[in-house]
Amino acid sequence: MTSHDTSMTKYTTSQGEFFAGAEPYLLTPGPLTTALSTKAAMLRDWGSWDDDFKAVTAEIRARLIAMCGGEADYDCVPMQGSGTFSVEAALASFIPKDGKALILMNGAYGQRSAKILDYIGRDYVILDKGDYLPPMPEEVDALLNEHKDVTHVVIVHCETSSGILNPLKQISDVVMQHGRKLIVDSMSAFGAIPLQVSDIPFEAMVSSANKCIEGVPGFGFIIAKKEALEAAKGNSHSLSLDVHDQWASMNKTGQWRFTPPTHAVVAFLEALRLHEIEGGVAGRLARYTKNRDVLVDGMRAIGFETLLENEWLSPIITTFFSPNDPKFDFSRFYNEIKSRGFVIYPGKLTEADSFRVGCIGLLDHTVMAGVVKAVKESCEVMGVKNYGPPDGVK
Ligand SMILES: *Cc1c(COP(=O)(O)O)cnc(C)c1O
């Protein structure tokens, strides 16, 4: 498992056997390692106006709505582009021009939402918790008392820049008590962390094809209350990112307004089928949790420290401090690990050197054990002795 050879190696996973070895595993939170059948689904060309392709789009929308229990009041709008395109589309479409947002920020993706609001000219206030602390319900309560004009609260479900799993349910409860609307960036969590509208009655939720559903990149999707989709008419500054227009037109014609990423869409339907076979959200959460546990236990046994306390560790991605050893060199570390068959992710912290290892994608705990072994070997090759975090951290 740990050696990167050019021959094709057969792996047995919960989803059957597949072949790898000619390409490294992606321990990155999207694009990520996908199933062979997901890739194979792309070996056909589709007419975007054809009934067969319209049926694919309709089935994807229905499956996504069912995943959060939204059949009665919600609809799903796929949107071309990477996940950020869908976040921007949602913020511009659901927050009216005279609305005001409270952005709960604890990393790069919360910061990005604020930047989007700067671009599109929506008013907002922020709660910024830095790199590794969650926004707390009491803080949100106090801010909503203070800012009566806030119409929408924007939260990142799993802040992928640190891996923190934010307390969405508690915060949703506070937002509902105040009668405000909730917009969730669940990009890196949806499909693996339970999210039911009966529990968390969000106004809109955004995710994308290439994260926990394990599709390939090319589009995102928005699940929103039908009444919010109706009310979104005329809000967007952008034609191509207008969620209302995409929704109304898709419901009328069954087609995407503009050229859809057809291959990514059919691959996504295959990924959704595999998701169901694995046991849906619960099955995926179980596999990712085991991946995370094998990774974190193995890394701590070597001497690495995680950025986050156990309570906030997500089963999506984990941040480790870079070893406080002059022999440690991240770019060499990255290449040593890659030569052993795994691609990891640089850190995204403002304060301390770190790196991240994703637990999502078609990987199981045997792959994670291979990652730990590759990390250990790579550090030994570099002569690293001290694995503790940089001075002054924690
Ligand atoms: C991946 C991700 C996004 C979107 O990133 P893209 O690079 O545009 O796909 C947004 N928010 C979160 C929390 C993410 O993990």
Image (cartoon, rainbow, N blue to C red):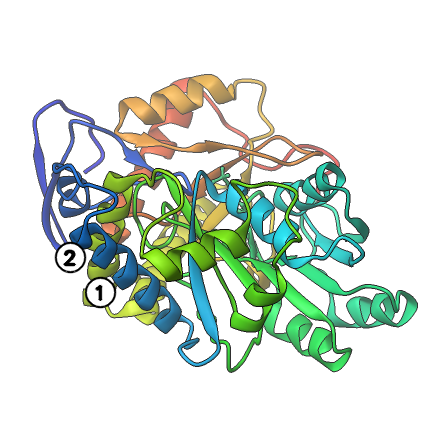
Whether residue 191 is visible, yes or no, is no
Q: Reading the chain from its start, which is encountered first: label 2 or label 1?
A: 2
Residue at (12% x, 36% y) in the render: 43
Give the image quarter of residue 252: bottom left
Q: How crowded is mark 1: few (under 14 residues within 10 Å), some or many (20 or more)?
A: some
Q: In which quarter of the image is the N terminus?
A: top left
Give the image quarter of residue 339: top left
Question: Given the image, on which type of amino acid does mark 2 rest?
Answer: Gln
Asked which secondary structure carries label 1, the reply is loop
Asked which secondary structure carries label 2, the reply is loop
For this orientation, the residue located farthest to the front is: 252
For this orientation, the residue located farthest to the right is: 146
Residue 369: give x, y in percent of width and height: 29, 46
Q: Is residue 273 above or below residue 210?
A: below
In the image, which disc is placed on residue 15?
Answer: 2
Question: Given the image, on which type of amino acid does mark 1 rest?
Answer: Glu
Q: In this view, does 358 lie to the left or right of 36?
A: right
